[in-house]
Image (cartoon, rainbow, N blue to C red):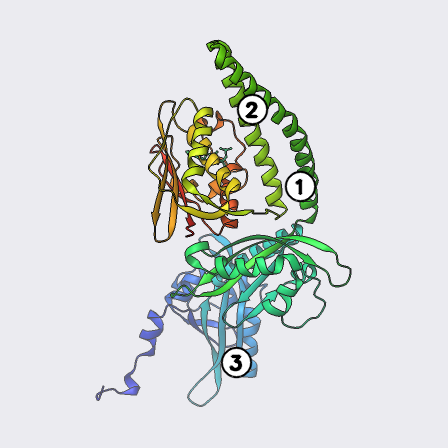
Amino acid sequence: MNNFQPGTFNFKTIFDASPYPIFLCIGEQMTVFYANAATLSSWGKTDTVIGMPFYEAIPELKDQPFNQLLLDVYHTGEAYFSVDERADLVVDAKLQTFYFNFSYQPYRNPTGEIIGVFCLATDVTELVKNRERLQASEESLRLAIDAAELGTFNSDLEKGTVYWDERCRELFNISHGDALTYKDDFLPGLHIDDREKVDQHMNDFVFVKSLSDGNLDIEYRTMSTKDSKIRWIKSRGKVFFDTNDKPIRLIGSMLDITDQRQTEMRKNEFITVASHELKTPLTTVKAHVQLLMRKVEKDGDNFITGSLISVNRQINNMITLIQSFLNNNILMEGNLDLHYEVFNVHELLKEVADDQGFIILQHDLILEDCEAVMVSADRGKIGQVIENLLSNAAKYSPNGSKNIISCKVSNGQVEIGVKDQGIGISKNDHKKLFERFYRVNSDIIKNVSGFGIGLYLVEEILRYHKSKIKIDSELGKGARFSFFLELVD
Ligand code: ADP
C-alpha cells in the first residue's frame, strides 16, 4: 500500500474487467472511443464498433433517444441519469428488449473542455421483467379476487394492526375509514351468538401452532348494526409464527356464503322433516320385529329366526343412518344439547357391545376388561360415538376379524378405544377423515355404503364434551380410534 502511486493506477484494466457496461464516445459524431466487454455483450456487437459513430455502431438505436441524449450531455455539460430505460437491441441476431439504469457524464480534457460523454450502465432487464410478471400476476389475482367477491385481510398480530380491504369492511358493515382492530371492529361485528365461540377458536386453536398448524378455516355470522341483516361468512387463512411458535401475522380471505347457507338450511330442514317421518314408522316396525323374534325363538324355527335377525339388523342400520342425519343437522345449526349424567362406562360399553354384537354378526367383537368407572357426560351421545366407531370397524375390516373395545384408566381419566384389523388409513387422510362428507378415495371404500358423516359427528360430539378423537392407523394395518373422558368420584 505504501508504494501506491495514484498516477500509475490503471483505470482501463478495471473498466475492462467490470461486469457493468462502460463506454466513452468522443466528438460531435459520438464516435465510440472505448467500450468494455460488458458493453459490447449488451449491445450484441464485437470490438469492430470501436471508432464508429454511435448511431452507426448500433443502427437499431437510430429511432430511439440514446444518440440524442448523448449529444445533449455533450452540448450542455449536464449529466443525464436514467432508470429502467428501455433499449431494443439486436443481440444473437434477434431484436430484443432490454432495460438499463445508466448515467451519461460529460467527459472533459485536462483544460476542462467537454470532448465526449462517458457512460456507466447496469443491465436491469431481469429485474424489470420480474416486476412486470409480478404486476401481471398480482393483477390476475386481484381480478380473481374481485370475480369471486373475496375480501382479503392482513393482520400484524404483534402490533395489533389489521388491514382489511373494501370488501371485508363491507361484509362487516364498517363505514369509518380509520385503522381497524380485532377487539373494536372484528369481534363487535360478529353476531352476538358467535362472538365468544369465534374468539375462543382463534385464541385456543388457530393461534396455537401445535393444534392448527396455523390454518384458519371458520364460518361465522356478521350482523349489521344498521338493519340487523345477518350474513354468513366463510374465512380461510394462514397464521405465520416466529421461531418460538408465537403467532405474528395472519393473512386470509372472507367470502359471503349467506345464499349457500340458506339453501343448505332449507335442504337440512327437508332432511330433518323426512328423517323424523321415517323414524316413527321404523321404530314401530322394529318393535314388531322384536316381538316376532321373541315369539319365534320359543317355537324354534331357525329359518324365520335367521330372517328376522337380518331384518332387525337392516332396521338398526337405517335407524343409525337417520340418527346421523338428524344429528348432522343439529350440529349444522350449532345447537347440540348435551344432557349430562353420571354413569358407569363399563355398563355403557357392555350395552353397546351387546347391541352391536347382535347387529354385527360377521365379526368377533371383544370387550376387553374394563373397570366400573364413573364419568359425567351425555350417555346417549357417547353411546352413539362408540356405535359409530364400531360400525366403521365392522365396515372396513374383513369378515371374521377381531374388533376390540378397550377401556383404560389413568391420571383421572378413562381412555375408550375401538380397534380393528381392517384396511387401515393412510397418514395423509388422518386429518381429513373428520370433515363432513369426506370418504377416503379408494376402490374398497366405494364398495362400502356410507355418507362420510359418522366421524364428523364423532369429533363434534367429543368436542362438545371438551374431548378429542385420536387415530392410530396405517394403510393395510388396521385402525384404532380412541378418546378420553374425565372420571368423577
Ligand atoms: P362413512 O363410513 O359413512 O363413509 P365416516 O365419517 O364414518 O363415514 O368415515 C369417513 C371415512 O373414514 C370412511 O369413508 C373411510 O374411508 C374412513 N374410515 C373410517 N373408519 C375407518 C376404519 N375403521 N378403517 C378404515 N377406514 C375408516
Dot 1 amino acid type = Glu
| Residue 128 seen by the camera | no
- Judging by the rendered image, the residue that carries numbered circle 2 is 315
Q: Secondary structure at mark 3?
A: loop
Across and down, in percent, residue 158 comes to 49, 71
Instruction: Indicate the amino acid at tag 3.
Output: Ala
Tell me where residue 167 sits by quadrant: bottom right
Picture quadrant of residue 287: top right
How dense is the environment of label 2, judged by Cα within 10 Å: few (below 14), some, or many (20 and up)?
some
Q: Residue at x 47, y 34 (%)?
A: 387
**Which of labels 2 and 3 is toward the front?**
2
Residue 193 lies left or right of residue 161; in this view the side is right
**Disc 3 versus disc 1: nearer the observer:** 1
In the image, taking residue 386 as reference, residue 437 lies left or right, namely right
Q: How many marks?
A: 3
Q: Position of residue 52 (x, y in %)?
A: 46, 67
Label 2 vs 1, first from the N-terminus: 1
- Determine the secondary structure under disc 1: helix
- Whether residues under marks 2 and 1 lie with C-beta atoms below 8 angstroms apart, the answer is no
